[in-house]
Image (spheres, helix red, strand yellow):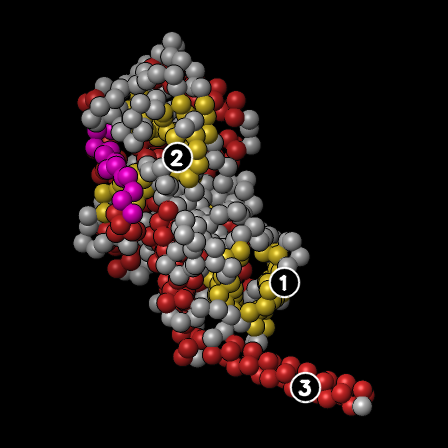
Amino acid sequence: MALGRVKKTMAVAVAVVVVLAVHFTRTMALDPTVIVIGAGMSGISAAKMLSDAGIKNLLILEATDRIGGRIHKTNFSGLSVEMGANWVEGVNGPQVNPIWPMVNKLKLKTFFSNYDNLSSNTYQQTGGLYKESFAKAAFDMADKLSEFSTNVSTSLTASRLEDISILASQRLMNMVPSTPIEMALDYYNYDYEFAEPPRVTSLQNTEPLPTFTNFGEDVYFVADPRGYESVVYDIAKQFLATNSAGKITDQRLKLNKVVMEIRYSPSGVIVKTEDGSIYRGGYAMVSASVGVLQTNLINFQPDLPRWKILAIYQFDMAIYTKIFLKFPYKFWPTGNGTEFFLYAHETRGYYPIWQQLERAYPGSNALLVTVTDDESRRIEQQPDSETKAEIMEVLRSMFGKNIPDATDILIPRWWSNRFYKGTFSNWPIGVSRYEYDQIRAPVGRVYFTGEHTSEHYNGYVHGAYLAGIDSANMMIGCIKKKICKFQIMPKGT
């Protein structure tokens, strides 16, 4: 009798397991699991698009303790400042920048950035301001050089000729910036936007720049206590569960999960994290930065195909460092036409672009100076005290020896952070639609997204947002319509 009951119980258990297995298989076939790796703008944008399409069996793995990625606020001496993305770039043009309505919906505090008066606010290496007439002549020449480069780019594109660097176009005009003020203006026109110098930056993909051509030339500085990242949180809360306080509590979002391995096969993916967790799913959406993809943080098994690796390695991960400083009192000009000022040093890129923050943070006595590329790497590797001393020497050359020392300094270190390895991607010389298609193309059931996969808007917040939608649509087409083959156009087409 007892043995018979055991056999009957075992038979029932086996039947239940079989039924559950069949149910699980059918569920996976109808609504496959998607593991989204990274909860920055692209990852969250992609996840929302998938959710809206009915693919709700999602899991989002984020390496840090927050969402937002390179959009991240922090407290600096009582001020809420942006460590990464800080502007809505491209406003009031023929098309609406998709980020702009989101910012306005949340009523974030934004401030129009007016650079028109820079010729009156350009400082020599020593000796104070340049004479305005001299500076204006230099600005006019820089504008002519930029216009010439745009014409060269348009001509190359129309003739289907190969790409060149911005510097190469300047050489064509026999006007390579070389004096301190010429280099400062060249830096302002290019490095300040792309975080890398003209000698490595693609001409055809930056002149004219689609962001400003399509969305408008106005830019707005975000300075709100809730942070620019609240835009990402708002998107996330549209598909992730929250509690009564508005905090995301959805179990599909897991923080502090550092992905170390992605195994993929025709039947699905297995994702391993550094804490020993293992997650299985139907597909993976990788939104890690191109800088991270160029490291060994995430191990793909099997290795990504050679064409994919080469495409990833061809893109640049640039570094853009915004250094915040606070002082006991203001010693710089304030009022209309004084928000931005330039410093022209014999070393190109040596603390060149300055912003006084009185409009954004009234009474804060705060300045912001921007450096990029090699200077960013150098500064990240030295003590903050050394950087502060260098900055004070520059400020004293501009405003006199009797100005006070900064009381506080904040130096983001995006390059040193293994979860980012830089700030945003830059499109280098020679990368065409062919390489772009390769970098955004899926490998089996592993899909890729991020601002670096945005053909026209790489490096921008709106690029990250639109890239997430684009990559999600590719995955949706595969899951729902079984259109899984991604066509890469031949090189040169």
Taking the spot 56% from the left edge, 45% from the top edge, the residue there is 418
Q: Main secondary structure of the magenta part?
A: loop
Q: Was residue 55 drawn as part of the magenta stretch in this picture?
A: no
Tell me: residue 168, above or below residue 78: below
Q: Residue under circle 1?
A: 278
Name which of mark 3 and mark 1 comes first in the sequence: 3
Please tell me whether mark 1 sits on a helix, a strand or a loop: strand
Q: Nearer the viewer, residue 96 or 376?
A: 96
Q: Was residue 118 drawn as part of the magenta stretch in this picture?
A: yes
Q: Residue under circle 3?
A: 12
Taking the spot 48% from the left edge, 58% from the top edge, the residue there is 250
Q: Which residue lies furthest to the top in this view?
A: 402
- The answer to whether residue 326 of the structure is visible from this angle is yes
- Residue 180 at x, y percent in the picture: 35, 26
Q: Which of 25 and 141 is in front in this view?
A: 25
Residue type, numbered disc 1: Ile
State which mark lies toward you, 3 or 1.
Answer: 3
Tell me: residue 25, above or below residue 162: below
For the record, the magenta segment spans 106-119
